[in-house]
Amino acid sequence: MFSTSIKMQSLKTKIAIIGAGPSGLLLGQLLAKKGIDNIIIERASGEYILGRIRAGILEQGLVSLLAEAGVDERMKKEGHIHDGFEIAHYGKRHRIDIKALTNGSTVMCYGQTEVTRDLMQARQSIGATTYYESSDVVIHEQNSNSPFVTFTKNGIEYKLDCDYIAGCDGFHGVSRQSIPKEKRNEFERIYPFGWLGLLSDTPPVADELIYCKTKRGFALASMRSSTRSRYYLQVPLTDKVEDWSDDAFWAELKKRLPEDVAEMLITGPSIEKSIAPLRSFVCEPMQDGRLFLVGDAAHIVPPTGAKGLNLAASDVSTLSKLLDKTYNGEEPDAVAKYSEIALKRVWHAERFSWWMSNMLHEYDDDNMNENETKTLERFMASELDFHLNYEEGKKVIAIQYVGTVSYTHLRAHETKANLV
Ligand code: FAS
Ligand code: PHB
């Protein structure tokens, strides 16, 4: 039984949101728009969160959600709509014309940092409460009708009473760990390489993204604006970011870009450089009583398919609709369906991201002998031939990259679940 200490300050809200990354902030904004009161508890400072360089590609579903949340003004001005991207296979460039192959769908190139900044400003402008730099966050009694969260801020202990708790605290947060281990069924694949990312205030080397599969390893040429570029190199898990000078990065990138592209590369000093490990991870179920896992708290994808942020947004879309139905009386126990609906889309995105990662990266799998390795290389070469030289193969990539399949699938499941 939890005993409230005399100096503990009591707070109350409808939805306690843990984490002020894109999941928490977008959920908070959508709920506020529906008149559902919420408080966000965040471990880090706003400045620290904005310093993390992450996703760069937004699916149309997320673009629409940001419009619904009323935070798409700057994105419409500064974001860049992309009709396609390229896959370079051993230097040969193949364009995936996503607009033509998906009857008009496109993606928006606008950094997650900017999405987070826009959401932070919107939350501030509506006067909603966010406790940044909080510590000792603990979730209590999620299987009762009166769950609550305790945390400390500036030496003061708080008890936040609420109806529901949204765990938007990422892969290393407390929410998933607050579900008893015996209730969690976790799936994981850790890839034997990482991505070394570099951000520079240099003009992008091409107008669209180029995913490069080379014998030296994978590379990705991306961007944040017409003056800011984002590049990635596949590196061994043993590499440390301090092993990579800017010059070394640029020299290796030039070797992995197609020759005609490498000639156009404009280099410059890095403004951010970091190595991210790659993993596929899913926790089932994504809820326990009145606690819901949202975004990276529930699942992780390798960034090869540009799905991480978009998948988080899809969870937010489903949960905000279910909570709305619960509070407006349409369906008092609507939230019971959250995990089942969300997981349909999660596994689609997980499989696509795993498949793109296997197709575009070369790596030694210690579990395979030499003959199995060379046989797998033939399979993957044939896989790429089908997906880069046949319209049907390109279409399979295009409809998943824009999120049509999983988005349509999600809509179908939401319709079946009487959600839309
Ligand atoms: P986040 O991890 O963004 O946010 C969780 C928040 O919870 C953080 O602010 C954290 O400080 C806070 N928190 C954690 N523990 C807490 C606690 N105990 N109490 C209170 N708060 C707590 N996706 C792509 O689509 N493309 C990419 O290129 C890409 N690159 C990535 C690179 C890296 C290094 C990483 C880690 C992820 C990348 N992702 C990418 C995925 C990324 O964009 C995530 O999908 C996205 O950040 C998910 O957002 P959230 O679910 O809000 O989780
Ligand atoms: C990025 O711009 O950071 C980015 C874009 C597409 C990806 C991964 C990362 O698939």
Image: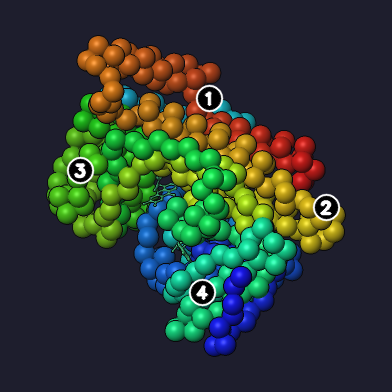
**Residue reaching furthest front?**
1
Please rate how many residues cluster around mark 4, counting C-alpha atoms within 10 Å: few if below 14, some from 14 to 19, many from 20. Answer: many
User: Around disc 1, counting alpha carbons within 10 Å, would you say few (fewer than 14), some (14 to 19), or many (20 or more)?
Assistant: some
Asked whether 340 or 201 is in front, the reply is 340
The reply to whether discs 1 and 3 touch (Cβ–Cβ < 8 Å) is no
Callout in the foreground (1, 3): 3
Which circle, 4 or 1, is nearer the viewer?
A: 4
The count of marks equals 4
**Residue tagged by mark 4?**
151
Query: Quarter of the image containing the N terminus?
Result: bottom right
Residue 396 — which label? 1
Q: Which mark is residue 238?
A: 3
In the image, taking residue 135 as reference, residue 143 lies left or right, namely: right
For badge 1, the amino acid type reads: Val
CB atoms at circles 4 and 3 under 8 Å apart? no
CA gap between label 3 and label 2 equals: 51 Å
- Which of the 4 quarters of the picture holds residue 263? top left
